[in-house]
Amino acid sequence: MRLFGTDAELLEEAGCDVARITELERSLVAGLIECPRADIHVHVGRDRDGHELDVDGLLADMDAWGIRRTVIFAPNDPGPDGDFADANATVRRAAEVAPARLIDFCRVDPEISALSVMEEAMRHGARGLKLHPIAQGRPPESAASIACVRRATEFGWPVIMHAGFGARSLADPFLGVLNAVPEARLILAHGARGDARAVSDALADHPGVWFDTSLATLSDLVILPRERLIFGTDRPYGDHATALQLVDHAARLAKWSEADVRRVLVGNFDDILGA
């Protein structure tokens, strides 16, 4: 069992009562309505910073928290050639373990063999693209990033992009992407943390834009349109308990209906990837 992204053994070594932590986690999300749940944002493999999650650990997490389906992609592990080949293969093998539950997204560095990597991933059944403008140092509005978004859109793929934690304005860069590829379907990770209101206002007329809730701020989730929100955890950096608590708090503060909560927890996910 993993709690708050930490091994239970480490918590025990620190003198924590693991059973009590589990009980408290459950109680903090007890108010959420009972409905299927899906997670749009999980990394499988080992990040070069040491964070890791394997498929067995992920499936155990999903069972523990009632997660029906999860989108998985590589952590920041570009490999010696920088093309994410080995990391994408790890994700692909993980998806093959539980194909009804795990949905494989391809990750690329837009300036390193990206289009050929995407072609290979498409042939192997990948269903989306992950871009991380900060980790790879490729701005979303760069020509290389836009080329990746364009090819993903031609494949019919949604594109999940890191948004937030980057100490820069986000609205104009993402508007540039959508002006270049109007048909793109973008999922902006972390609720576009740090620039959520400006991004939401700038992209209000673009129907193909969503925000995932992973590691977002509560104040951002309250102001963002619930019809554009998709539940995410960012495992192994985030965890299911805290991610679900965040949605529960936002629902209470913004007075979401039960239909709104279902939309955030599973409905928008199904609209993008199929039920």
Image (cartoon, rainbow, N blue to C red):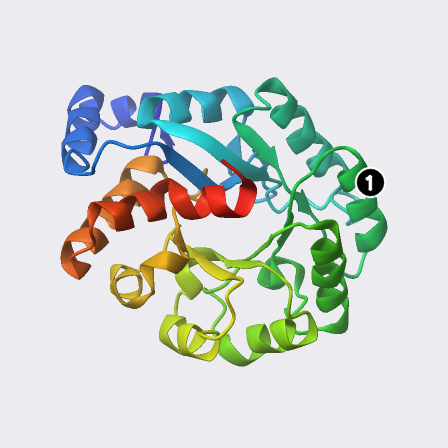
Apparent side of residue 14 relative to residue 84 in the rendered image (left or right): left
Q: Nearer the viewer, residue 251 or 54?
A: 251
Residue 183 position in % (x across, y down)? 64, 65
Residue at x-position 73% and y-position 62% = 150
In the image, what residue type sits under mark 1? Glu
Determine the secondary structure under disc 1: helix
Image quarter for residue 77? top right
Residue 69 position in % (x across, y down)? 47, 31
Residue 198 position in % (x across, y down)? 41, 78
Using the rendered image of the protein, determine whether residue 113 is visible from the camera's viewpoint: no
Q: How many marks?
A: 1
Disc 1: which residue: 120
Residue at x-position 33% and y-position 65% = 224
Image quarter for residue 36? top left
Residue at x-position 71% and y-position 65% = 145
Q: Nearer the viewer, residue 56 or 129?
A: 129
Mark 1 crowd level (few <14, some 14–19, many ≥20, 10 Å Cα): few
Residue 49 position in % (x across, y down)? 56, 44
In the displayed structure, would residue 80 be above or below residue 208? Answer: above
- Quarter in which the N terminus is drawn: top left
Apparent side of residue 45 relative to residue 79 in the rendered image (left or right): left
In the displayed structure, would residue 104 be above or below residue 170? Answer: above
Apparent side of residue 52 relative to residue 248 in the rendered image (left or right): right
Residue at x-position 71% and y-position 68% = 146
Q: Nearer the viewer, residue 113 or 147?
A: 147
Using the rendered image of the protein, determine whether residue 19 is visible from the camera's viewpoint: yes
